[in-house]
């Protein structure tokens, strides 16, 4: 079977078959199948090397099926994720903005070429997978439980990891900050038990600037969720936030609004997850 498999793979090198996506995907599936049979209980180094190379090739094949515009969105999402991870990895220079009695904490620091960024750190009672499902799979339902958000709409999905969204925020109490809207590219990734949801502002032909809203900008932003080391049924939740709300708003007001928005989000998310858990338990009974 193995010689036939490599004949199939060799066939995709010919010009007239190079763009036959179905054939190429079948070839990669066949390679993985044969490598799994060869590896046995203890795969050798060369088997692992070939498997890694074939996985990279599979990713390249998927990327080549995207249009130029779609590839740009994918790259923007990956850049937002990489930049966010870089910012969060640097523990120096953070100043405390808010520290709640329950341990929720918002910190901030100023970065060159980016401006002021905020970081929320909380511990949530739910498993990471449950939170990922709520924030990624059920993203468009956020307006139902977060009063600071009027609407989230997915404009376009690209593969499994990338999407373009339109978000409409509610005005703050007293209309200190009026309603804003955002068009963002989002990148959702899993690395082991850690989940990421990164994003940054972009443009989309399906959502030009809307009358009655100030088009604000964000990014890089990122939510990071990982199981607690003390209790894997709980989640360490980190949210990096960077926004340019536009308009003539004093920086002191912006700083207060953004840090409080993060604290409020954590509380609304807790209430949402607690309510969802109660409904699921009632259905199970």
Image (cartoon, rainbow, N blue to C red):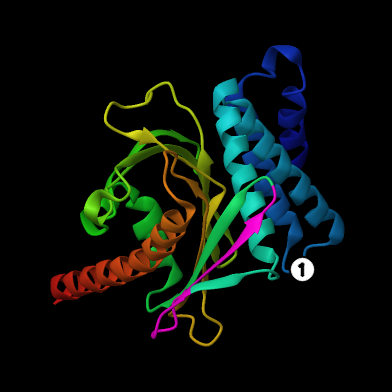
Question: Toward which corner of the image does residue 107 lie, by quadrant?
Answer: bottom right
Residue 166 showing in the rendered view:
no
Q: Is residue 275 left or right of residue 197?
A: left
**Is 190 located above or below residue 16 in the figure?**
below
How far across and down, in percent of the image, does residue 127 sit?
41, 73
What range is drawn magenta here?
Answer: 98-112
Between 147 and 211, which is closer to the camera in this rendering? 211
Between 73 and 268, which is closer to the camera in this rendering? 268
Question: Toward which corner of the image does residue 123 lie, by quadrant?
Answer: bottom left
**Is 140 located above or below residue 61 in the figure?**
below
* Image quadrant occupied by the N terminus: top right
Q: Is residue 278 left or right of residue 128?
A: left
Between 202 and 252, which is closer to the camera in this rendering? 252
Farthest top residue in view? 16
Q: Residue at x 26, y 71 (%)?
A: 271
Residue 122 showing in the rendered view:
yes
Q: Residue at x 28, y 53 (%)?
A: 172
Between 178 and 184, which is closer to the camera in this rendering? 178
SS for dot 1: loop
Q: Main secondary structure of the magenta part?
A: strand
Look at the image and say whether residue 128 sits in the magenta stretch: no
Farthest right residue in view? 46
Question: Label 1 crowding class (10 Å Cα cut-off): few <14, some 14-19, many 20+?
Answer: few
Look at the image and say whether residue 102 sits in the magenta stretch: yes
Q: Which residue is mark 1?
A: 42
């Amino acid at each position: 079977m193995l010689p036939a498999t490599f004949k199939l793979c060799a066939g995709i090198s010919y010009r007239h078959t190079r763009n036959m996506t179905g054939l190429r995907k079948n070839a990669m599936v066949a390679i993985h199948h044969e490598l799994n049979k060869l590896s046995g209980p203890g795969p050798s180094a060369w088997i692992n090397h070939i498997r890694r190379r074939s996985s990279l090739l599979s990713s390249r094949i998927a990327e080549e099926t995207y249009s130029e515009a779609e590839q740009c969105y994918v790259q923007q999402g990956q850049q937002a994720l990489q930049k966010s991870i870089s910012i969060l990895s640097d523990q120096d220079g953070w100043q405390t903005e808010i520290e709640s009695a329950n341990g929720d904490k918002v910190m901030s620091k100023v970065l060159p070429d980016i401006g002021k960024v905020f970081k929320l750190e909380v511990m949530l009672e739910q498993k990471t997978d449950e939170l990922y499902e709520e924030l990624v799979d059920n993203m468009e339902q956020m307006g139902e439980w977060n009063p600071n958000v009027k609407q989230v709409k997915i404009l376009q999905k690209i593969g499994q990891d990338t999407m373009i969204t339109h978000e409409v925020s509610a005005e703050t109490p007293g209309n200190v900050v009026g309603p804003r809207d955002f068009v963002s590219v989002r990148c959702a990734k899993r690395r082991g038990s850690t989940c990421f949801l990164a994003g940054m502002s972009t443009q989309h032909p399906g959502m030009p600037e809307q009358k009655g809203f100030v088009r604000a900008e964000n990014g890089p932003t990122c939510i990071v969720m990982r199981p607690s080391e003390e209790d894997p049924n709980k989640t360490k939740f980190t949210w990096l936030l960077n926004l340019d709300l536009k308009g003539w708003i004093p920086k002191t007001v912006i700083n207060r609004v953004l840090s409080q928005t993060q604290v409020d989000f954590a509380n609304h998310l807790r209430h949402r997850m607690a309510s969802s858990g109660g409904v699921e338990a009632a259905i199970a009974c």
